[in-house]
Amino acid sequence: MFSAQQDFESSSSPCWFVGALMEKEDKLEEFLQGGYWEHGFEDKYLDLVRSMRVGERIAIKAAYTRKQNLPFESWSNTTSVMAIKAIGVIKENSGNGKRVEVRWQKIDPIREWYFYTYQRTLWKVTPGEWKNDALIDFTFNNQPQDIDRFRNDPFWLDRYATDPTKLKRFQWTRFFQAIADELIKYKNNRQALLELLKSVSSKIDALKYLSSDTFADGSRGFVKDIDPFTFLGVFNRGIKDSTRINIAIEIAKFFGVTEPVPERFEGVPVLNNMSSWYFPWNKELPDDHIDKLWEVFESALQLADSEDEDLIEKFSQDFDTATSLYGVSWNLSCGLYWIRPWHFLNLDGLNRKFITEKLRLKIGLSGPKKICNSNEYLLLTNTLRERFVESDFSVHSFPELSFNAWTNAGSSSTDSEANEPEEITSTDESKNIEPIKPIKPYSIDNILEDGSFLSKEDLELMLRRFREKKNLILQGPPGTGKTWLAKRLGMALIGEDVQEPQLRSVQFHPNLSYEDFVRGWRPGSDGKLNLHEGIFMEMVNEALEKPSTRHVLVIEEINRGNPAQIFGELLTLLENSKRSPKDAMQLCYPDPDGKHLPVYIPANFYVIGTMNVADRSLALVDMAFRRRFAFIDLEPMFGKRWRDFVVNKLQMESSVADQIRERMNQLNTQISVDSRLGKDFKVGHSYLTPTESLKGKNSKQWFSEIVESEIKPLLKEYWFESQDEADKAAAKLLENL
């Protein structure tokens, strides 16, 4: 395995997990022999591959699922597995977005990682979260996976808990999945399914509705064809649980399913009894309608079980085709959830309400009849999966989400309606799709290259504390580069050189209010007062919509305002341990659309502030505010790193740099020992770090101008009652220059 002495960039750099299948052909040996990796897509991953940096670690993976022969008790659940086949270090990136050169090391035998896997060809894994750190250590440092920790994590607990007594919820999922596994075998033998349903309907009156189909000649009778979702709907309608169980027993007997028939149906959506079919009357039924439903059923099972990225496109096509069919609409998501409840999101009315009002996530509505299309469905599904793995998120799986939506509405299993009238529409607007911007990676190494005079170890500590606490304040004397560093730490945390909307800045001042920063009334163009979101809530909403990316708000001079007053009730939610929907609270003002929905700050939203400790006009920051932030002290840095930077990169005359270094250190010592001032009033290095090259310019003249126009006025402010002392200190800086 790679040791600390080998040539990877740093422990804080991202790691890459990549696939080796191209058009169904395994390219592993070719990649290893050729010393490279590439993908076979024309228009995918280009910017992501361009962002891969020399020195970053890379691993070849293969993701699949397995139900048997696992090194732990899976309780008959299908488990995600990721095989690690090779590891390496990136040697060269040509920038074509397709290929990188790699020094590979084959893993033989392959090592298998469980639970926390990724389906797509390219996966960027950034250190800082325990699951990511565990995967990186397993892959590159040959550390064993703590399987029990994953099994007992909230995301996997209901399926894999080490304590069987914790597996009481959602036991129906195994039965539903087993039924789906058998049902697909009858895709081309639907007559057998119809005979089964006829037989069951003769025993159980609840199935009599299947005898009401209308044919072209005007006659009525039993349906002549059946799709998989209507079939599953026979025991998932608004009927008594006892009847559902009896129907399920008959179906299980026919299929030979050995999984126990569920006694409870917590979190299982049911169809509206008035509209329980996924197809119209036989007399209006297109020839391929039911075939298309079988197609999406099959592609959904394949996608859920194989974790093959190539199947995403096929599923998307089948999904969009199916949702456009008469009688399907939102019900398709309900059917997908029945067959693979841990993989697919149910979007019945209760779930949609819960997702938008409690979880504060938007549902795209660009599909037919103003429902979501396949891209929007998969995006929302992936967004929720990313949230589920957050330990403090209020729900951790699709069954738990569906169950919480059901209980939150106070409904019973028999009156929850998944199937809604065909003509139902929504007034929500679909979200515009933004073009993908090129990715320019950014790390601690970039901060050093840009001109930080701190050590790499110091920067790594700051970034680590920022990740852990989520709220950080840089404090120090004037000119110590607090704002400069805050923005770059934000970019390093995000991992990219970005600006809005992921990285934004605001400055606090005495007149800034809660209404400006969070939410409040403002005059509109019509002369009326309207509710508007402040920058903080704008960024919260952005972070909620894009959970896979980090968002950073830089607050300059955070103590120039009254932070406790400006943040208001959100000060409580700012705490790292309260970043989840379960801690959500209502704001004093409603949403701009008039709703009074509870608000929470997501875990991917970070705040970094700056604080000038020398400003006497500032109020003290209260303890409640301080508890929610980690504090980092910055000092003037006129050391070797500063000297080398201004001489080698900014072309300052070396003799002048040496004089500045010596004299500024002397001045700061004088300020530190002055009882009227102290170390908080030192003069920082930013004053004497040129913003552009001094090549061709007189370095002495530049220094003199900075002293006269910037440092001397500052000293006069410091020694306000002793102006002569300020003049002498400034003169000493320029003496015999």
Image: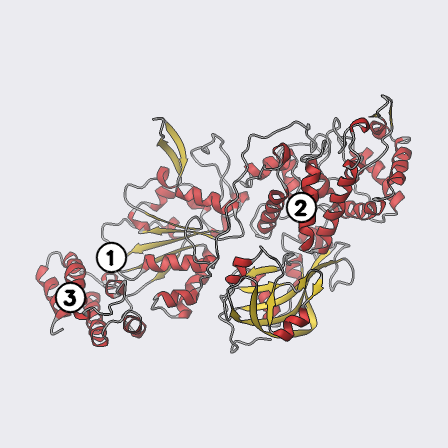
Q: Considering depth in this image, is 104 or 211 the residue closer to the camera?
A: 104
> Residue 160 or 535: which is nearer the viewer?
535
Q: Nearer the viewer, mark 2 or mark 1?
A: 2
What residue is shown with label 1?
614
Going by the numbered disc 2, the residue's amino acid type is Ser
Residue 316's disc number: 2
3 vs 2, front mark: 2
The residue closer to the viewer here, 669 or 20, is: 20
Mark 3 vs mark 1, foreground winner is 3
Q: Position of residue 259 (x, y in %)?
A: 82, 48
Nearer-N-terminus badge (3/1): 1
Figure quadrant of residue 130: bottom right
Q: Secondary structure at mark 3?
A: helix
Residue 342 shows in the view: no
Query: What mark, if any, has residue 704 been given in the picture?
Result: 3
Dot 2 or dot 1, earlier in sequence: 2
Look at label 1 and name its amino acid: Ala
User: Tag 1, which secondary structure?
Assistant: loop
The picture quadrant where one finds residue 198 is top right
- Is residue 532 found left or right of 209 in the rendered image? left
Looking at the image, tell me whether mark 3 or mark 2 is earlier in sequence order: 2
CB contact under 8 Å: marks 3 and 1: no
The tag on residue 420 is none
Q: Secondary structure at mark 2?
A: helix
Badge 3 density bin: few <14, some 14–19, many ≥20, Cα 10 Å: some
